[in-house]
Amino acid sequence: MTKIHNLGFPRIGAKRELKFALEAYWKGESSRDDLKTLGQQLRQRHWQLQSGLDWVPVGDFAFYDQVLDMSFTLGNLPERVQDFHGDALDNYFRVARGRSAQSASNAQCCGGVAAGEMTKWFDTNYHYIVPEFTAATEFKLDASRLLEQLAEAKAQGVTVKPVIIGPVTYLWLGKAKDDSNKLALLPKLLPVYAELLETLAAQGVEWVQIDEPILVTELDAEWRHAFNTAYHNLQDSRVKLLLATYFGQLAENRNLAANLPVAGLHVDAVNGRDDIEPLIIRLSADKVLSLGVINGRNIWKTDLNAVLDWLEPIAQQLGERLWLAPSCSLLHVPVDLDSEQKLDAEIKSWLAFAKQKLGELQVLATALNRGRDAVKAELDANRAAIKARRNSSRVNNPAVKAALAKIDAKLGQRQSSYAQRALKQAALLKLPKFPTTTIGSFPQTSEIRLARSQFKSGKLDAAGYKAAMRAEIARCVREQEALGLDVFVHGEAERNDMVEYFGEQLNGYAFSQSGWVQSYGSRCVKPPILFGDISRPQPMTVEWISYAQSLTDTPMKGMLTGPVTILNWSFVRDDQPRSVTCKQLALAIREEVLDLEKAGIGVIQIDEAALREGLPLRKSQWQEYLDWAVESFRITANGVADETQIHTHMCYSEFNDIIAAIADMDADAITIETSRSDMELLDAFEHFNYPNGIGPGVYDIHSPNIPSEQHIVALMHKAAERVPTEQLWVNPDCGLKTRQWAEVIPALTNMVAAAKTLRASL
Ligand code: GLN
Ligand code: ZN
């Protein structure tokens, strides 16, 4: 019999119940007991939804983050919160979110607490709280959370499989605050894991899922060795370990993984298909192999018949040793497609969210265990859905495919070199040295949000909405006139989100109502669904930007989101390579760029905020990604005349390893986030002799603090030590949409004054 299980279930709730409960609790509007009760209800509901599985995950629920949960289980709290004697959950939120010294609820303790650092969970859009280590870190088991949840699950009568993060991945995810070697902590950490496993065994637990996803990354000898040390050390445990890897191929770590002394191995059979055959040969005959055959990272139905064609011989071979599961935790997909009331019926019939994916798993297991006939109706329906999607005229647009086939190197090539373009642009735009600009958005005020929600609900008609947005744009232009900025923006009042706004206007996109996915803590995102060939039926931004330009003689910067960012922040098709989808997006946005240019817009910014986060987990695959990502940007941007100035923006501060690709994009100016890193990241640009314009952010828009003129001047002096002054722009780190006008005005006033000072002195 093939068994089925799940690696993790989304915990936010189909209606984002956890989000709202957390936020109410943090605001002091509900009690700790209310929050705990809701957590319990969600777990119960989610186990109920999974009760058809042979094992349900326990311990995958987290009030904030599963890595932070693990830090608490291992007793690894940052030193700054160790003396806290209040409630454990409150301390947990102190690490997760920090607490300011002024906070009223802070009476118990002593001043403020800095939040734990947050970073991206592998190549997903989920963010975890980074464990903190020093050479002196000690670990101490606190199994209370797991024991509590185990008891709940058992009371509910489901068969439990606790889920924990493995010791090697746990260390890898963390950061040594004193620059010590964190791997040196392994001997101190392993006894705590052994004790945890023993505690679970004492509860009658048979299997424990121990997640080691770093096995899909490139590991050096030390880390590979750590795997052997760790799992040989834990091999006498009384529970059976299912070592879980996901998010990619094991590749060169295949033998390492296959030979670890554990009872079973879970692998990603969606991204790591090539691993499976060799693994089956290498795996000793007493080990379970769990195949992640349902994609836990996207929202498409699985082609069940095709998977069965592949699986049946494997099932024959492995018999009882074969388990099936989604490729990874379902944390990365929305909960329930049934919640979607407005989604186009045809597109909906192609989709599967978490609940539906578990249904697919059951069909597969039944087909393997009792023959395909036992689930004939389900398999037939699935085949029909897959076929309909493949053949749908809404997915396939021959004109788009033809345009894609015509892409050649010339398409992404500017007419002249940067040096020549710069001269022509200078003659036309007549910008001063150290030109000032902003990144695009101005404050999204409550009036803007109100107008948008009234428009969506029909209370405000299209003309009324347009008038309200125009009024905002006009205000934004007036304010920029008063500030004396050199290149204006229209302020993005009409945009809800930098990807959704474009997705809504492109053919090939659909939108869910409640397809929320946790990003961090209570924050969720609702990625648009890119289902078909992409085309642009009509201009998307030209009217707004032209209106803004009509109000002023100062150059108005057209504002677009780039193809790579749109791709990386959407659920994208699985029926063609990402590179192909990206180039389709590139061709569509290119048309917009050319239309803006035709409308007389002389400066156009194409944001690529998410270019970096699309980098593959394995460095060996970076170049391939960067090649098509950069080509896509070039196709989008570089069809313009020499006189048109192209800007791009990226809001992060790590460029060392991708600087060549950034230079290859050949934007006339790039604005980046730098204000918190004290301009050090410009080193990458300096060493590369980056030739084009650079605007290192001088205003940290993530903070309500107003930078002083002197501070900005000092930052720009540091920049000028690294980059010739002719190349420098003066601008904030990122868009201003989350700030208040009352903060933005003084900050930009200081920024403009700083630029004047710089012009006089440098
Ligand atoms: N133009 C966008 C803005 O200003 C850029 C946002 C981003 O980089 N995340 O809001
Ligand atoms: Zn940004």
Image: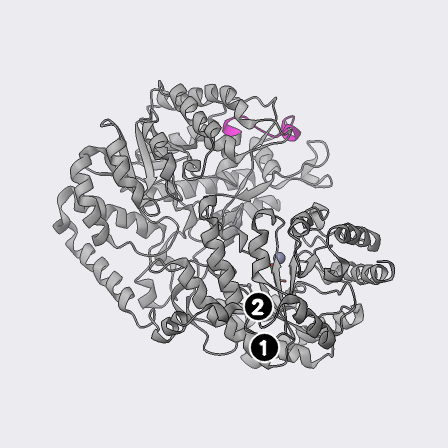
Q: Quadrant of ligand 2?
A: bottom right
Q: Residue at x 49, y 63 (%)?
A: 632
The 10 Å Cα crowd at callout 2, few under 14, some 14 to 19, many 20 or more, is many
Left or right for 713, reference 39:
right
Q: Which range is magenta?
A: 72-84
Q: Is residue 198 visible?
A: no
Can residue 82 be found in the magenta stretch?
yes
Amino acid type of the residue tagged 1 in the rendering? Leu
Earlier sequence position, callout 2 versus callout 1 = 2
Residue 576 place in picture, x, y as percent: 35, 60
Left or right for 258, reference 420:
left
Can residue 289 be found in the magenta stretch?
no
Task: Tell me the element at label 2.
Answer: strand
The residue to which callout 1 is attached is: 596
Q: Residue at x 69, y 64 (%)?
A: 438
Q: Residue at x 17, y 42 (%)?
A: 313
Color theme of the render: one colour
**Residue 169 vertical position relative to residue 359 in the rendered view, above or below:** above
Residue 270 place in picture, x, y as percent: 32, 47
Q: Main secondary structure of the magenta part?
A: loop
Residues at marks 2 and 1, CA–CA distance in whole angstroms: 10 Å
Which is more toward the observer, 282 or 38?
A: 282
Which label was assigned to residue 560? 2
Pointers 2 and 1 in contact (CB under 8 A)? yes
